[in-house]
Image (spheres, rainbow, N blue to C red):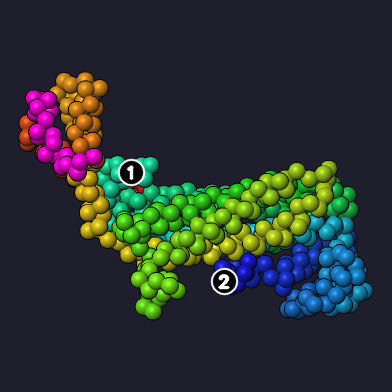
């Protein structure tokens, strides 16, 4: 990813220096395990650790690869230059390149998941704080983009919290599924390397051994991982779109924080645009873009082909770096989001009481009117509000059919906003636990 949408900690996971260091650790731990079972001399295993604090020369590895056309061989050649070719002669004993590549990739994805988990936890904290802050802040609920019935801004934040909490669980599961390693040889049969080597290396790296591999770790694991990132990205877009709607001039129930000196438009000095959430909508598309290629990587020829390799070299860094940046940006947006409760009330009252139509209809059914006739009576009065700018309560009081069934006090009682928020605490308890 470009630097504009990157954060250093996640970028570092995908740097060549980090990659080569993980390759080195795998090879060194494998030598230790081979020495323990007497396959290679202990002295040679010990010699490999001479490079423990070495910063491998990326340019030199690239130079060797330009000749060998093989990245792992280029690295092993350079390792031999660092520790001595004779000392390195047992490195990679019985292993295949994918043992190193796949195990490393999963280490990187696991570390990336740890950062993303922390990101989501930070976002959850911000959503929870804003939910409780606006637990009782009334706003209109919308369906199909049209006014429906009253909700609260706190419920909106709580809904997003619950969604992101599910994503946190999904990400924990994805991390567990991707945290496997394979040191099983050319086609996964352990023909030239003992299974205990794989167990030892995985233990040292915080992984579990892949139960059965071919030359590669099965890619359904990776498909599930990237699909999870895609779902999280979709949730980011879900939240972003709501904020973008709330910031529309005609709505203005909330807006992104506009800092001193910030400019909204090169042409129009008055503009305050939802640029961060628009940006998040775009970044979400980039993360989801990685999902289908990950799915298509599952189907490999026989024990292995390399059709997945070029894909993963791109989507591994791109998806995780982008999602890390997006989660951080969204947390900042939620933290500083400016809320306008008065505008929420004004918007809700724009159609002069229509939001209470269901309560009136249900009350009529309780008075013995059929549902069909109740709907007709309420709708005919509601349409005059839509079409003529009338007041809904006034129209109901002037309707003889309605008044024949309900008193003025009974009708007015159906316009109590508190009715719609009486179960907010119950919902909050479900979402956040005991409060």
Q: Identify the residue shown where x is 17% and y is 42%.
A: 390
Q: Position of residue 54 (x, y in %)?
A: 75, 79
Classify the position of the N terminus by image quarter. bottom right
Q: Position of residue 340 (x, y in %)?
A: 27, 61
Q: Position of residue 307 (x, y in %)?
A: 79, 51
Q: Secondary structure at mark 1?
A: strand
Is residue 352 among what the camera can see? Answer: yes
Relative to 392, 98 lies left or right? right
* Nearest the eye: 5 or 324: 5
Q: Identify the residue shown where x is 72% and y is 51%.
A: 209
On the image, numbered disc 1 is attached to which residue? Answer: 146
Relative to 309, 241 lies left or right? left
Cα separation between marks 1 and 2: 37 Å
The image quadrant of residue 129 is: bottom left
**Image: 109 above or below 15:** above
The magenta segment is: 387-406
Q: Identify the residue shown where x is 69% and y is 50%.
A: 293
Relative to 109, 33 lies left or right? right
Membership of 317 in magenta stretch:
no
Q: Is most of the magenta stretch helix, strand or loop? A: helix
Mark 2 closeness class: few <14, some 14–19, many ≥20 residues within 10 Å: few
């Amino acid at each position: 990813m470009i630097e504009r949408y990157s954060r250093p900690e996640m970028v570092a996971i995908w740097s060549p220096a980090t990659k080569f260091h993980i390759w080195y650790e795998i090879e060194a731990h494998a030598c230790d395990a081979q020495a323990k079972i007497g396959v290679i001399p202990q002295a040679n295993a010990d010699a490999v650790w001479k490079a423990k604090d070495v910063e491998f020369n990326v340019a030199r590895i690239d130079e060797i690869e330009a000749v060998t056309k093989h990245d792992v061989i280029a690295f092993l050649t350079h390792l031999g230059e660092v520790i001595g070719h004779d000392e390195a002669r047992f490195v990679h004993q019985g292993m295949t390149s994918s043992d190193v590549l796949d195990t490393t990739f999963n280490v990187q994805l696991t570390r990336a998941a740890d950062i993303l988990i922390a990101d989501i936890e930070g976002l959850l904290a911000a959503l929870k704080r804003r939910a409780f802050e606006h637990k009782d802040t009334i706003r209109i609920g919308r369906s199909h983009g049209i006014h429906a019935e009253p909700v609260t801004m706190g419920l909106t934040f709580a809904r997003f919290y619950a969604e992101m909490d599910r994503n946190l669980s999904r990400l924990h599961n994805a991390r567990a599924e991707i945290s496997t390693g394979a040191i099983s040889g050319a086609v996964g049969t352990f023909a030239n390397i003992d299974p205990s080597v794989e167990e030892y290396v995985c233990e040292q790296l915080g992984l579990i051994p892949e139960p059965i591999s071919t030359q590669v770790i099965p890619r359904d694991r990776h498909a599930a991982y990237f699909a999870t990132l895609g779902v999280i990205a979709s949730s980011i877009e879900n939240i972003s779109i709501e904020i973008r709607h709330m910031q529309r001039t005609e709505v203005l129930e909330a807006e992104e924080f506009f800092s001193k000196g910030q400019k909204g438009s090169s042409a129009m000095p008055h503009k305050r645009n939802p640029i961060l959430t628009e940006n998040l909508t775009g970044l979400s598309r980039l993360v989801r873009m990685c999902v289908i290629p990950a799915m298509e990587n599952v189907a490999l020829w026989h024990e292995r082909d390399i059709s997945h390799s070029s894909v993963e070299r791109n989507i591994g860094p791109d998806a995780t770096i982008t999602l890390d940046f997006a989660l951080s940006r969204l947390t900042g947006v939620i933290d500083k989001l400016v809320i306008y409760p008065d505008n929420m009330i004004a918007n809700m009252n724009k159609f002069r009481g229509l939001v209470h139509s269901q309560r009136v209809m249900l009350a009529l059914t309780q008075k013995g009117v059929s549902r069909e006739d109740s709907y007709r009576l309420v709708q005919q009065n509601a349409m005059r509000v839509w079409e003529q700018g009338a007041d809904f309560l006034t129209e109901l009081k002037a309707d003889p059919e309605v008044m024949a069934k309900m008193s003025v006090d009974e009708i007015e009682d159906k316009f109590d906003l508190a009715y719609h928020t009486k179960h907010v605490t119950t919902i909050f308890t479900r979402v956040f636990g005991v409060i």
